[in-house]
């Protein structure tokens, strides 16, 4: 199998922490370039922006977009127009409409577009989906609570319009439940706590239901210090299931069924390679749609200003 020549665009925290090691360990890809205004990677060709990269390196076959969502669309459009396969960090865009447009452009250009949801590749998620497929869900309780100062130091874009605020991590929980629940569900009520000096919420409380009136609730909070919580608890007609530690630990009843290490990004790149080989795309906007619904229906409550 020939290795696909790939470039990373937007070389920040997630590119360094996850994309580089995952690409290093995947023979299907060779990391040949980085495009980022201020950052570079030793031993890899560097370009200031995506257009220069596309102009000067026509041999690059795929682009992995790791900049904030507010610039995703213009970068993806340029890459697709240049005939590249494109992988989008989550969230896939700042709006639903722009992601739909990218899907159409990729189809027209005959390239692969992969809108990634890394939490779906956490160790317990696939088995949870399989088990729940046979069950009737009665209730879901999502607790996704972390310390924004610890995980997003100095990142201004998360607080700006299009940065999603606490939905930046919360969308990971939504990406899991949209993948594992057997029925579609929709928002009925929401409350968004927005710091007086910010655009994005610092916390959100959401209530959803499905066609069988399952009671689905989610609490996202960026103000949690001490131990961090990324847990999903589900009650079914056959007993409880819990996905904790971000989806890496699966418990069914009292039994721990899976406790895995961090293999989310290797899973994403394996899937990207498979999509390219099969000439397919994978663009699921369901998690982003729920976030958009929360901004549509949720009541805003002003809370204390947030300072780093
Ligand atoms: P980050 O550390 O702020 O890095 C993003 C990089 O993109 C920046 O370092 C910057 O590099 C570039 N960039 C920023 N604004 C730009 C602009 N206006 N135009 C062009 N480039 C720009 O952010 P991150 O945490 O890596 O997050 C990036 C994406 O990954 C987000 O969508 C986030 O939701 C997702 N993600 C993050 C994490 C995490 O733990 N941090 C986990 C999973 C997914 P230059 O200044 O060098 O251009």
Image: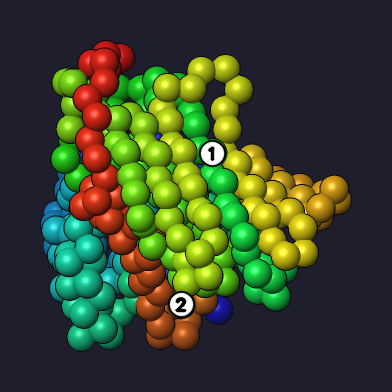
Residue 194 vs residue 34, the one in the foreground = 194
Q: Is residue 238 left or right of residue 64?
A: right
Residue 250 vs residue 4, the one in the foreground = 250
Residue 212 vs residue 121, the one in the foreground = 212
Residue sticking out furthest to the front: 213
In the displayed structure, 135 sits above or below 263; it is below
Q: Is residue 196 visible?
A: yes
In the rendered structure, find residue 143 and report the number of the disc placed on it.
1
Q: Secondary structure at mark 2?
A: helix
In the displayed structure, 86 sits above or below 145; it is below
Task: Give the quarter of the image for residue 76.
Answer: bottom left
Residue drawn at point x = 16 percent, y = 21 percent: 197
In the rendered structure, find residue 168 and report the number of the disc placed on it.
none
Q: Is mark 2 within 8 Å of ligand 1?
A: no
In the rendered structure, find residue 275 and report the number of the disc placed on it.
2
Q: How is the image coloured?
A: rainbow
Real-space Cα separation, disc 1 to disc 2, in angstroms: 32 Å
Q: Do the residues under discs 1 and 2 have CB atoms within 8 angstroms?
A: no
Q: Is residue 34 visible?
A: no
Q: Secondary structure at mark 1?
A: strand
- Please state, as top left, top right, bottom left or bottom right, where the C terminus lies in the image: top left
Query: Mark 1, mark 2: which one is toward the viewer?
Result: 1
Are there few (<14), some (14-19), or many (20+) residues within 10 Å of tag 2? some
In the displayed structure, 133 sits above or below 199; it is below
Are there few (<14), some (14-19), or many (20+) residues within 10 Å of tag 1? many
Residue drawn at point x = 29 percent, y = 36 percent: 192
Residue 211 % position (x, y): 47, 72
Residue 217 % position (x, y): 49, 48
- Please state, as top left, top right, bottom left or bottom right, where the N terminus lies in the image: bottom right
Residue drawn at point x = 32 percent, y = 39 percent: 191
State which image quarter holds ligand 1: top left
């Amino acid at each position: 199998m020939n290795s696909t020549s790939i470039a990373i665009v937007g070389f920040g925290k997630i590119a360094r922490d996850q994309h580089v090691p995952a690409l290093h360990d995947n023979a299907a890809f060779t990391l040949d370039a980085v495009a980022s205004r201020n950052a570079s990677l030793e031993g890899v060709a560097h370009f200031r922006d995506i257009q220069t990269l596309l102009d000067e390196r026509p041999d690059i076959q795929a682009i992995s977009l790791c900049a904030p969502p507010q610039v995703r669309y213009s970068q993806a459009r340029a890459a697709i127009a240049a005939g590249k396969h494109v992988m989008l960090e989550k969230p896939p865009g700042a709006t639903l409409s722009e992601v739909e447009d990218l899907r159409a452009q990729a189809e027209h250009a005959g390239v692969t577009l992969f809108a990634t949801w890394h939490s779906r590749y956490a160790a317990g998620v696939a088995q949870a989906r399989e088990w729940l497929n046979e069950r009737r869900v009665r209730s879901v309780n999502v607790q996704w609570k972390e310390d924004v100062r610890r995980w997003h130091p100095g990142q201004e874009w998360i607080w700006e319009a299009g940065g999603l605020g606490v939905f930046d991590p919360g969308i990971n929980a939504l990406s899991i439940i949209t993948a594992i629940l057997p029925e579609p569900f929709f928002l009925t009520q929401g409350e968004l706590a927005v710091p007086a000096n910010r655009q994005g919420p610092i916390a959100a409380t959401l209530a959803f239901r499905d066609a069988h009136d399952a009671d689905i609730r989610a609490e996202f909070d960026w103000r949690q210090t001490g131990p961090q919580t990324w847990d999903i608890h589900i009650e079914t007609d056959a007993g409880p299931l819990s996905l904790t530690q971000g989806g890496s630990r699966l418990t069914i009843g009292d039994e721990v069924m899976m406790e895995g290490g961090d293999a989310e990004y290797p899973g994403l790149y394996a899937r990207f390679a498979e999509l390219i080989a099969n000439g397919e795309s994978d663009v699921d906007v369901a998690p982003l749609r729920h976030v958009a619904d929360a901004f549509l229906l949720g009541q805003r409550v002003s809370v204390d200003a947030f300072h780093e």
